[in-house]
Image: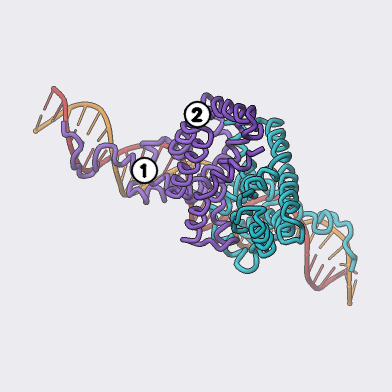
Chain colours: A purple, B cyan, C red, D orange
Amino acid sequence: MVDKQEIVEGEADGAAEERILAAAHAVFLKRGTYGARMQEIADEAGVNKALLHYYFRSKERLAEAVFQHAIGQIMPRVFGIVGSDLALEAKVHAVVEAELEFFSAHPYLPGYVLAEANFNPERIQKMFARGGAPPLGKLQEQLDEAAATSTMRPMRAQQFLVNLVSLLVFPFAARPLLDVLLGTGGDGFRDFIEERRGYLAEFVLRGMRP
Amino acid sequence: MVDKQEIVEGEADGAAEERILAAAHAVFLKRGTYGARMQEIADEAGVNKALLHYYFRSKERLAEAVFQHAIGQIMPRVFGIVGSDLALEAKVHAVVEAELEFFSAHPYLPGYVLAEANFNPERIQKMFARGGAPPLGKLQEQLDEAAATSTMRPMRAQQFLVNLVSLLVFPFAARPLLDVLLGTGGDGFRDFIEERRGYLAEFVLRGMRP
DNA sequence: CCATGTACTAACCAAATGGTTAAACTAAAC
DNA sequence: GTTTAGTTTAACCATTTGGTTAGTACATGG
């Protein structure tokens, strides 16, 4: 048994399958699930269209794999921070860093995920049917503690997290709009985001002050 | 020339055209532009499919009409407030009220607009090519004034507006996700939004404090 | 009452699209 | 060398989809 080497038509290992998934990721994120064409994905992967169905039975299944892969890259990180033992302030800073860094590297992702969630809500329900909720227990304790000592105003963890995530995700999801409405084309947008990186965490925490 | 009266097959006035636009609005918002089917729009409007092409030449044109109609309902309102002579605090409160009220009545709209902007950025560029930018001059003056008197931290109007809009729009755009992740189904979401209505304006303003 | 322009529809069409099939190629097992 | 099992493809298919066409119905205006 050769451990992963050169192959002629069969390239290598699971290379074709991975290339298909990567190509599907690119095409789905750019065009959306309904706008994406199986042929375009095949072309992008340098593979016959039938092979897509060989590895992923249908477009629907392929879309599921891509969606799960997409959210699987960022949601666990954020949930990990939120549920950690970090202090409240540290959590906010950590989430800001994690999301801005990640979305800067994957700018199309937020728009894709939101669109998919809106036009295919059944998939969301199906995927998160069991155990997809963020670990808000610890966060709520911290918020309650801060409220008890009058360090912060009382707030539900859900609201707190949504506020934080809103400020981080929205600019990426609305990027095409911001580019034209605010004139943040190309580098302008990157600068815009960098500016936010510098103040967003404190902005959110200040908003909690009594 | 009869000034707009009853017609037999032609229902009345421009009723058919309006019904088509309304149906298109409903279907496009629910399924997205690529997911929408001309036949479904025709059915929803109770009209032959050919009539869609009679009034709007193509799906693309119909989509443009729907999109323009969609953003034309809310953007001018917000821009009006932002560019008005209201005091900074009043502007924030007014925008919060205006957007939460509007999006509560049109919950699908944010998701649709963002998806459309992402998967069809050319349309955005084309539509806002000339004169679509928000009037930030006045707002920036107010922010500068507040910063000069150390009432608020300095901030660019763009950042300020994006922060405000992020907090207002994101929950609606991400509603299917929040419903399942936070368990805000049906009434839960409405309550969630009502809670925000009570504190968001002050939250944003507090975030600006020095 | 006939010509006219507008609104509307049934039937149709070509292209695109997701999906299938049968065969070919490859590497490893025997 | 032959078999076997996993990959990969060219060709094909049924259906869907946006769009067109030819014609009908009808109110109006001459």
Residue B36 placement, left or right of C23: right
Chain letter behind tag 2: A
Which label belongs to residue A20?
A: 1
- Whether residue A75 sits left or right of residue B157 in the image: it is left
Identify which residue, B40 or A127, lies in the foreground. A127
Q: Is residue B112 visible?
A: no
Please name whichever residue, B26 or B134, is drawn nearer the observer in this view of the structure: B134
Quarter holding the C terminus of chain A is top right
Cα gap from disc 2 to disc 1, whole angstroms: 34 Å
Secondary structure beneath disc 1? helix
Identify which residue is drawn at 72% across, 61% down.
B83
Q: Nearer the viewer, residue A131 or A206?
A: A206
Q: Give SS at disc 2.
A: loop
Give the image location of residue A202, x and y in percent. Answer: 55, 44
Q: Which residue is mark 2?
A: A83
Q: Is residue C5 left or right of residue A54?
A: right
Q: What amino acid is labelled 2 in the image?
A: Gly
Q: Residue at x 31, y 41 (%)?
A: A16
Same chain under badges 2 and 1? The reply is yes
Give how far across and how far down residue A32 sits, in percent. Answer: 51, 47
* Residue at the far front in the pictured view: B149
| Screen quadrant of the N terminus of chain A | top left
Q: Amino acid at mark 1?
A: Ile
For the point 51% across and 62% down, the residue is A185
Vertical placement of residue B89 versus A162, above or below:
below
Residue at the location (33% across, 47% down)? A47
Q: Position of residue B14 (x, y in %)?
A: 80, 58
Is residue B185 depicted above or below B93 in this figure?
above
Q: Residues within 10 Å of mark 1 (few under 14, many from 20)?
A: many
Quarter occupied by residue B69: bottom right
